């Protein structure tokens, strides 16, 4: 009996070792490649920022007091630029946890952010890079959402008054819909907004974070399998009341300008 | 029990299972935290500027901030204005002292009415900024073609008496251009819902305050 077990052992051991190595390898390679990608992405943006200022290095801007004033100036300048047109823009103040939409200097809607989470990237920007990224509004390159931007309903013209009455009697009860939208901004920055319904079970930021963690892992592994470092995208997750999330999303034009202050 | 132990509680079984769970934990919990942590990125240089340079830079940035603030202050309207939220169907009325009144309204239903001959109308309240172009007391509604088509009625000639409806727009109307208006309604139970053909409907009391607060040229912000 013992002899038979011993005969099977090498195969079992091999399988066990292969699986162990695969799982550990995947975990390790994902972390290593992604970490490399994140650092690389940061250095690329920092390089672009240096080029934008003519490669003149001014480390004095990183003095905490100067940097704080620079952030204030950038916040106002970017909003000024976004508000100079006739389109509604989005302003996201991570420092004060406020999201608002503005049009020509008027705050149309202000929403208090109930929960916020963002990449460490935003906290580690030096002054020159911060100024490069946030002194102007960021353009929205694409978006996706769980809720329609235009809640269009098509109705055929009734043939007579009887048909018109029947159309009126149709059920018009609206279903509660989850509201979550994402804006893909310039410089590969992603903004994800989740509407929190006070009557629905709350989705925690950890759950949301994990969901995007899986998506990022799948995309990352695809790229790693092609011998590429996975693309790094700094993300901002914002939770606001569901009605505010819906109103703000519908108000924004497709190529909305977004101002960010950290 | 011992057979179970021998079969399953061995490193050959538990090892890969443990590694699999380790991978799941890495993907769901550890990796996002590591990747978004401050430790991955190089830090901000720890710099303290000398007093002269600091004063110069702070002065320059302060001036730029003041200029920007002045521009921002100029941008906002000096007179009264109204903000209309077409998603929640609410309005907020402001004058130079701040919020005057807020409440429910009705805005465009986003219904697209299609007629057989490829003619269609979209009943929406256009977003953006408009101005009050005119103010009317006891307005009369001249019903457009779609009002008849929607009810399954034949469309009458341009100035047919059946096109004129008295009292359905309430006591006042503020015109916004392109046929859009802020006016009253007979259907007050629908306030707070998107049910109109594009106009903004208010209840009688709110309409009177809006009519008296806004003047011709006042801005109407719709989102």
Image (tube, coloured by chain):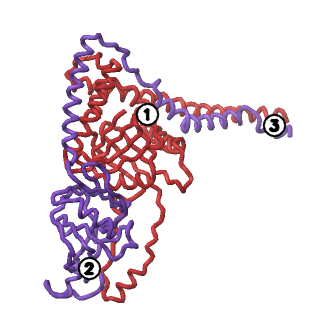
Place residue B87 in its image quadrant.
Answer: bottom left
Chain B: give its colour. Answer: purple
Place residue A18 in its image quadrant.
Answer: top right
Q: Residue at x 32, y 19 (%)?
A: A62
Chain A: give its colour. Answer: red
Camera-nearest label, 2 or 1: 2
Q: Secondary structure at mark 2?
A: loop
Instruction: Tell me if residue B49 comes above or below residue A151 in the rendering.
Output: above
Residue under numbered circle 2: B167
Residue under numbered circle 1: A119
Camera-nearest label, 2 or 3: 2
Q: Earlier in the sequence, mark 2 or mark 3?
A: 3
Quadrant in which the N terminus of chain A appears: top right
Q: CA distance from mark 2 to mark 1?
A: 58 Å
Q: Secondary structure at mark 1?
A: loop
Near mark 3 (Cα within 10 A), the count class, few <14, some 14-19 or many ≥20, is: few
């Amino acid at each position: 009996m013992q002899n038979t077990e011993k005969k099977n052992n090498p195969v079992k051991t091999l399988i066990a070792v292969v699986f162990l190595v695969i799982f550990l390898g995947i975990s390790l390679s994902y972390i290593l490649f992604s970490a490399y990608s994140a650092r690389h992405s940061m250095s690329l943006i920092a390089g672009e920022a240096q080029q934008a200022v003519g490669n003149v290095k001014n480390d004095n801007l990183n003095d905490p007091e100067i940097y704080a004033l620079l952030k204030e100036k950038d916040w106002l300048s970017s909003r000024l630029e976004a508000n100079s047109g006739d389109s509604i823009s989005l302003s996201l103040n991570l420092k004060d946890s406020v999201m608002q939409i503005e049009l020509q200097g008027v705050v149309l809607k202000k929403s208090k952010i109930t929960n916020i989470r963002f990449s460490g990237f935003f906290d580690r920007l030096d002054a020159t890079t911060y100024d490069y990224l946030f002194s102007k509004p960021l353009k929205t390159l694409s978006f996706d959402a769980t809720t329609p931007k235009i809640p269009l309903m098509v109705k055929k013209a009734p043939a007579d008054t009887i048909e018109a009455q029947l159309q009126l009697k149709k059920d018009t009860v609206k279903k509660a819909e989850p509201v979550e939208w994402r804006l893909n901004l310039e410089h590969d920055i992603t903004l994800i907004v989740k509407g929190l319904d006070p009557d629905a079970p709350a989705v925690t930021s950890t759950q949301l974070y994990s969901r995007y963690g899986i998506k990022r892992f799948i995309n990352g592994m695809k790229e790693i399998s092609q011998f590429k470092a996975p693309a790094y995208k700094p993300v901002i997750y914002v939770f606001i009341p569901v009605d505010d999330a819906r109103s703000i999303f519908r108000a924004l034009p497709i190529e909305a300008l977004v101002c960010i202050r950290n | 029990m011992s057979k179970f132990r021998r079969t399953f509680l061995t490193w050959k079984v538990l090892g890969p299972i443990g590694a699999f769970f380790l991978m799941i934990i890495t993907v769901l919990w550890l990796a996002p935290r590591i990747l978004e942590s401050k430790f991955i990125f190089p830090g901000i240089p720890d710099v303290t500027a000398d007093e002269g340079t600091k004063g110069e830079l702070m002065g320059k940035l302060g001036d730029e901030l003041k200029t920007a603030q002045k521009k921002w202050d100029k941008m906002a309207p000096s007179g009264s204005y109204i903000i209309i939220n077409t998603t929640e169907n609410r309005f907020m009325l402001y004058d130079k002292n701040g919020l005057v009144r807020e409440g429910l309204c009705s805005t465009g239903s986003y219904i697209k009415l299609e007629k057989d001959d490829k003619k269609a109308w979209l009943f929406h309240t256009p977003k953006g900024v408009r101005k009050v172009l005119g103010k009317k007391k006891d307005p009369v509604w001249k019903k457009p073609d779609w009002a008849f088509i929607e009810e399954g009625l034949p469309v009458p000639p341009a100035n047919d008496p059946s096109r004129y409806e008295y009292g359905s727009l309430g006591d006042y109307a503020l015109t916004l251009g392109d046929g859009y208006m802020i006016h009253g309604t007979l259907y007050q139970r629908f306030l707070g819902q998107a049910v109109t053909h594009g106009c903004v409907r208010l209840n009688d009391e709110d309409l009177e305050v809006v009519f008296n607060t806004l003047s011709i040229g006042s801005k109407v912000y719709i989102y």
